[in-house]
Image (cartoon, grey):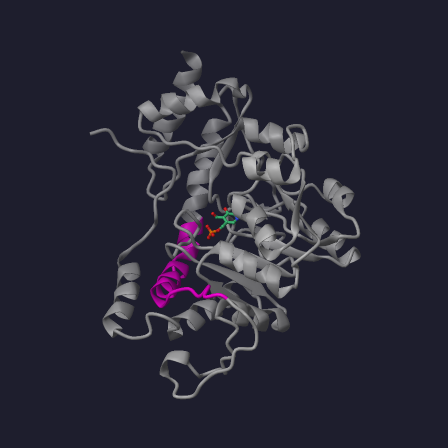
Amino acid sequence: MKKTYSLFDIYWDEKDIESVSNIIKRGSYWATGPEIQEFEEKLGKYLDVDYVATFNSGTSALHSVLLAYGISSGEVIIPSMSFISTANCVILAGAKPVFADIENETLGLDPEDVKKKINKKTRAIIPMHYGGRVCKNIEILREIADDNNLILIEDNAESFGARINGEYTGTIGHAGMLSFCQNKVITTGEGGAICTNDKNIYEKLLLIRSHGRVEQPGTNYFSNINEMDYIQVGYNYRIPTMCAALGLSQLGKIDKIIKLRRKIGKFYDKELEKVANVQILPDIKTICNVYQLYSMLLENPENRKELQEYLLERNIYTKVYFFPIHLKTFYQKKFGYRIGTLPVTEEISKKVLTLPFSLRFTERDQLFIINSIKEFYST
Ligand SMILES: Cc1ncc(COP(=O)(O)O)c(C=O)c1O
């Protein structure tokens, strides 16, 4: 049977099984268990932030943080080169997504274009850290946000553990979002979090994620004879305890995971640099890339689909991360976006292709993928 090279595979071990089964066997607190707070504290310690609130997805986390900052109208500047959730959350909160273009090295928001998009209605900027990289202008974007009295929320779904000048992504803005969906740096199946140093925002997040219910520290809704008060409307966006327990055991392996990711990523970089028609994204000295995705650019992208099909015949899965959000049907219809609005985004999106990535890859596996790309171009 031919080996399959999937887009990603989950890095798990016996400790992950033990963590989850311990909660199941306990037979209580499958919801709102103490492992949730423990996971939040350990994430906070790792990232060196004061507060972390977990959620049942990155999407619910991003939606909630926009609500916590009261961004229920006005405009929010975001990249179009992202997963749809970045834009959807802005609409769900009640604001309008305004797309700005990206630069072509880390595929992060371009500060010059962001400045052009700021007006009286602008409330926030949401830069996205792409595929384990760091939006290289994140510090400049923070300054722009501060100068214009705007909130900077980092969409750090894809780059947990990445750093720029020693600082972790997700901790440079006013708040940062994490995702623990299955293809992320660490995973709980589904899950997400917001990290922030702002106590007031953190407290609002706790209300939004759990029905607007006031919970005193140490009291738990499910083991408390007293009625609790509800002081606003809220969702049930809480992470299940089993997922938090899984998060704890995944976080326990973070150094090993990042080391392996960097080894696989750097091997792709080294070998793909020699391949005709392929352009690798530059390695930037101040940035520690954790390679959540391995994306390359094709110099002649006209036959990208044929390349994908050729590779698929060899059981090699590839994908385009991302097609621009502003050109998706809903966004075109609702906001009137058209081709040509964001030239760099549209150009990169035409050229980009993401390769399979597994922490269990041997060099032989990676060479099989790379040689298959070479074969495609030589036939
Ligand atoms: C850039 C980006 N933003 C937001 C999300 C949404 O996260 P989740 O899938 O956990 O809701 C993802 C993950 O898929 C993502 O890649």
Q: Is residue 251 magenta?
A: yes
| Residue nearest the observer in this picture, 264 or 38 | 38
Q: Looking at the picture, how far across and down is residue 152, in whole percent?
A: 67, 56
Q: From this view, report whether residue 10 is shown above or below residue 220.
A: above
Whether 229 is among the magenta residues is: no
Can residue 107 be seen at all in this image of the molecule?
no
Image quadrant containing the C terminus: top left
Where residue 317 appears, as percent x and y from the top left, is: 37, 32
> At 55% across and 57% down in the image, what residue appears?
62
Q: What residue lies at 54% left-to-right and 62% top-to-bottom? A: 194
Q: Quadrant of residue 365?
A: top left
Q: Is residue 344 or residue 358 the one in the foreground?
A: 344
**Residue most toward the left?**
1
Q: Position of residue 228 (x, y in %)?
A: 47, 83
| Depicted 274 relative to depicted 17: above or below | above
Using the image as rendered, state which of residue 297 and residue 339 is in the foreground. Answer: 339
Residue reaching furthest top? Answer: 379
Quarter of the image where one finds residue 223: bottom left
Q: Which residues are magenta?
A: 235-258
Q: Image quarter for residue 29? A: bottom left
For residue 193, above or below residue 315? below
Judged from this view, the residue extending furthest toward the bottom is: 225
Q: Decide if residue 170 is on the left or right side of residue 313.
A: right
- Which image quadrant: the N terminus? top left
Note whether residue 67 is visible: yes
Q: Main secondary structure of the magenta part?
A: helix
| Horizontal and vertical percent position of residue 45 | 51, 67
